[in-house]
Image: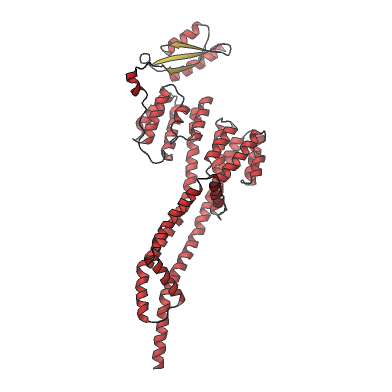
Amino acid sequence: MIAAASQIVQSRVGNRRTNTLKGNARRVCAIAHDQRRNCRNNASNQDEAIAKIRNKGQFATKIKEKAAKKKVMKKDAPSSGTRKKMPMSIGGVPKKQLVSFTRQLSTLQDAGLPILRSLQILEQQQKPGLLKAIIGGVAEDVEGGGSLSEAMSKYPKAFDKLYVNMINAGEAGGVLDLILARLADFMEKAAKLKKKVVGAMIYPAVVISIAVGIVSMIMIFVIPKFEEIFKDFGTKLPGVTVVLLDISRWFANQYGWAYVLAFPFVFMAIIRLAKLSEGGKYAVDAIKLKIPILGGILGKTAIARFTRTLGTLISAGVPILDALNITRETCGNEVYSRALGKVHDAIREGESMADPLRATKVCDAIVVNMVDVGEETGDLDKMLIKIADNFDNDVDVLVSSLISILEPVMVVILGVIVGFIVVALFAPMITLIQSVSGGTSKK
């Protein structure tokens, strides 16, 4: 047993050995296993630490470097506590950059590089910006003796609670490279799903915006010219033409164009204000889920997101209650967030996950049954990820259906608007022609 432990230690030490240590800036702490107790021995380098352990008739199971505490003079105090200044940035780190960083860090860890060296390499290759500064700050904290998860938790603009907890689980389980790879996969799939939903909304939004712009220009600049012509006719105008002229006056003379332009911004502002309260946020999210077709897309997107998040956290070794808390904060929909809160409370009381999830009535029966099977077989994490994959496919189908339905609907709506304008403009001319032809025939 001692020989086997010695081989393991030698392989670990060989992967993490550094060539030199500058002065007394660091000390090497070797932890020896002796009847379930940890012994700490200070040495100037790793070879000396291992030798001290062997002289005591013990064997090293873990070699860890720690930064030495420096005595700093008062005059040096300002410079010793300084951290890298973060550049000005609106929002956080772009998801694309964060996914690339996570994937590259996973590759370097899989190759056996020390975490500090990996961070330094990634910092050097980053372009100047927020992420580069954050990686530098994380590297400084790790070099100072902190763990990677603790260092990342100080930068919430880049690393959210989900990210930090998974890194913490990877460090505790010694599978940081696998956890980083799973994180990258998770973020890529989440970004892909979000892109699909947003992409489905862009097309109708662009078409409607262009249509409103064209109709507004017609109302402001074209219709008033026809109104002058109609006044010269001196005939009674049809009702449809009167309505069109009233709309045109509202657009041109009563700042109707400003109301139309401001409407989407005011609408979004009202929604944001409503979301400031818990009740308002719940009401807005509940209304979204009731919208035909779009509500189905948003509901399946929320299910896919929370099942993938929860499955990824459980597979990383995060306790189920902690995983539910993190998932509840990141699911993006208050309806599902409250449902997960009820599931969390029920599990804390000793119940299973499937029964309280069924009681919330926010998930399809297939989701609850698959969760139930996952609990029975002990593969809840795998089952949750399968649910997420299935619902991702359902979202693809719904998005395609939505686009297919919106195209003819928008064509019909635009046709009705154009037809109304044409009829309203030509109806007086037809009346005038009839009156002129009638007068001529009498003569």
**67 over 90 or under it: above or below:** above
Q: 90 and 256: which one is in front?
A: 256
Is the C terminus in the top left, top right, bottom left or bottom right quadrant? bottom left
**297 over 34 or under it: above or below:** below
120 relative position to 182: left or right: left
**239 over 17 or under it: above or below:** below
Q: Residue furthest bottom?
A: 443
Q: 401 and 364: which one is in front?
A: 364
Q: How many marks?
A: 0
Measured from the top left, where is residue 290 in percent x and y?
57, 53
Q: Residue furthest left?
A: 75
Residue 392, image quadrant: top right
Residue under the point 51% across and 6% down: 56
Residue under the point 36% across and 22% down: 80
**Looking at the image, can residue 394 be seen?**
no
Measured from the top left, where is residue 211 in percent x and y?
42, 62
Is the N terminus in the top left, top right, bottom left or bottom right quadrant? top right
